[in-house]
Image (cartoon, helix red, strand yellow):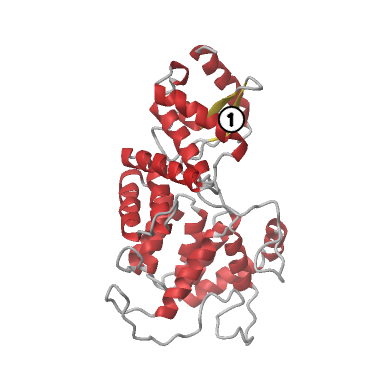
């Protein structure tokens, strides 16, 4: 198939999918082009072009009814008064939330199977397409004219291959995927910089965990690309003090940046910080808005957290926690502790934060 015919096929196939909202346009980047917005490769058996959504940052847009007035109020209004108004409003929406979220009060999360748990990257190709992708990467590596959509296409293809290889069970595949990912990250590919940082942080593909090196990738990617996932990951590092000195205010700033780009987990973490007063003054009304936004994006933990706040019963004993979500402790005395880095930290609080972050990732 010639380049021209392939381009025509791309346009013909892409138009209805774009109209139907199947193909995600990476609106976060002013440099995004039609070729960048579409992933394609040849199914050599069927002789057709397959399309996959390009989610450069992986976060779509969600327009929610404005309820800023619930958070703003008058200058003389206290935080408690604003929270009471927000609480009244959202409690009036409980039946709607239950219906949309298919929430079950007896479950720690929603029971819906229509909103699956999310992770990032969320566009990893299925195993059955991996061999086709690997074959196409060979053409990219040879500079074949059939794949003359530019380096952006080939690098995105390589990123998908690397992501798929890292999901395999055998060590060789994982190491090969990591090598591809590292090469892309060193070239400045935003998704690769982020994912490679995550691999460094977790110790993937046989590596020892290296939070400090991970932070350097997240920081550079956030500064250069404004990548929401990198902003979130860097915020987590400051939140837990892993790989960098703990800084609650900086964590909140980064969560807010990512949340404003519609990153569901960052919305959740920002709401949690506002609710507990971590790195920011307590603002329960605003916290509820961010948690509801995360819930509307499909974040299951946020849905449970919202319902726990809305259904909290005055006078009920929640076993030392503020509500049924069991995430915020009523009071916690400071426990002197010096970690390996030499700074004083409360180990119980560190474990709590690590648990919150772990739960936040399980959307």
Residue bearing mark 1: 51
**Residue toward you, 86 or 162:** 162
On the question of residue 257 being in view, the answer is no
Horizontally, residue 7 falls left or right of residue 203, namely: right
Residue 319, percent across and down? 59, 85
**Residue toward you, 150 or 163:** 163
Residue 3, percent across and down? 49, 14
On the question of residue 46 being in view, the answer is yes
Q: Is residue 311 above or below residue 316?
A: above
Q: Is residue 156 above or below residue 262?
A: above
* Residue sitting at x 55%, y 58%: 294
* Residue sitting at x 32%, y 68%: 247
Residue 8, percent across and down? 55, 16
Helix, strand or loop for disc 1: strand
Q: Quadrant of the C terminus?
A: bottom right
Mark 1 surroundings within 10 Å by alpha-carbon count, few (fewer than 14), some (14 through 19), many (20 or more)? some
**Residue toward you, 199 or 314:** 199
* Residue sitting at x 58%, y 64%: 301
Q: Is residue 99 above or below residue 57?
A: below
**Residue toward you, 163 or 352:** 163
Q: How many marks?
A: 1
Residue 208, percent across and down? 38, 58
């Amino acid at each position: 198939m010639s380049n021209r015919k392939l381009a025509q096929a791309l346009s013909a196939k892409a138009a209805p999918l774009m109209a139907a909202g199947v193909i995600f346009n990476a609106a976060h980047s002013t440099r995004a082009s039609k070729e960048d917005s579409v992933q394609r490769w040849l199914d050599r058996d069927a002789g057709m072009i397959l399309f996959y959504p390009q989610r450069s940052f992986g976060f779509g847009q969600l327009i929610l009814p404005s309820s800023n007035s619930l958070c703003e109020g008058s200058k003389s209004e206290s935080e408690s008064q604003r929270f009471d108004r927000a609480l009244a409003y959202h409690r009036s929406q409980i039946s709607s939330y239950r219906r949309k979220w298919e929430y079950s009060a007896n479950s720690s999360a929603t029971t819906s199977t229509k909103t699956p748990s999310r992770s990032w990257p969320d566009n990893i190709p299925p195993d059955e397409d991996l061999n086709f992708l690997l074959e196409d990467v060979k053409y990219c590596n040879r500079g074949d004219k059939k794949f003359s959509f530019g380096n952006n296409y080939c690098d995105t293809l390589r990123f998908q291959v690397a992501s798929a290889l890292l999901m395999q069970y055998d060590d060789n595949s994982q190491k090969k995927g990591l090598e591809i990912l590292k090469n892309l990250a060193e070239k400045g590919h935003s998704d690769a910089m982020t994912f490679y940082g995550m691999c460094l942080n977790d110790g993937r593909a046989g590596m020892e965990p290296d939070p400090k090196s991970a932070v350097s990738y997240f920081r550079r990617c956030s500064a250069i690309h404004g990548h929401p996932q990198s902003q979130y990951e860097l915020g987590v590092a400051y939140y837990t003090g892993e790989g960098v000195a703990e800084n609650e205010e900086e964590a909140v700033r980064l969560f807010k940046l990512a949340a404003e780009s519609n990153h569901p987990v960052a919305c959740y973490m920002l709401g949690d910080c506002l609710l507990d007063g971590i790195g920011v003054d307590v603002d329960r009304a605003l916290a509820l808005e961010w948690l509801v936004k995360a819930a509307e994006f499909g974040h299951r933990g946020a849905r449970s957290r919202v319902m726990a706040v809305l259904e909290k019963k005055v006078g009920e004993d929640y076993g030392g926690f503020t509500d049924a979500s069991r995430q915020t402790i009523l009071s916690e005395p400071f426990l002197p502790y010096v970690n390996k880095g030499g700074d004083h930290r409360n180990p119980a609080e560190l474990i709590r934060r690590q648990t919150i972050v772990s739960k936040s990732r399980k959307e």
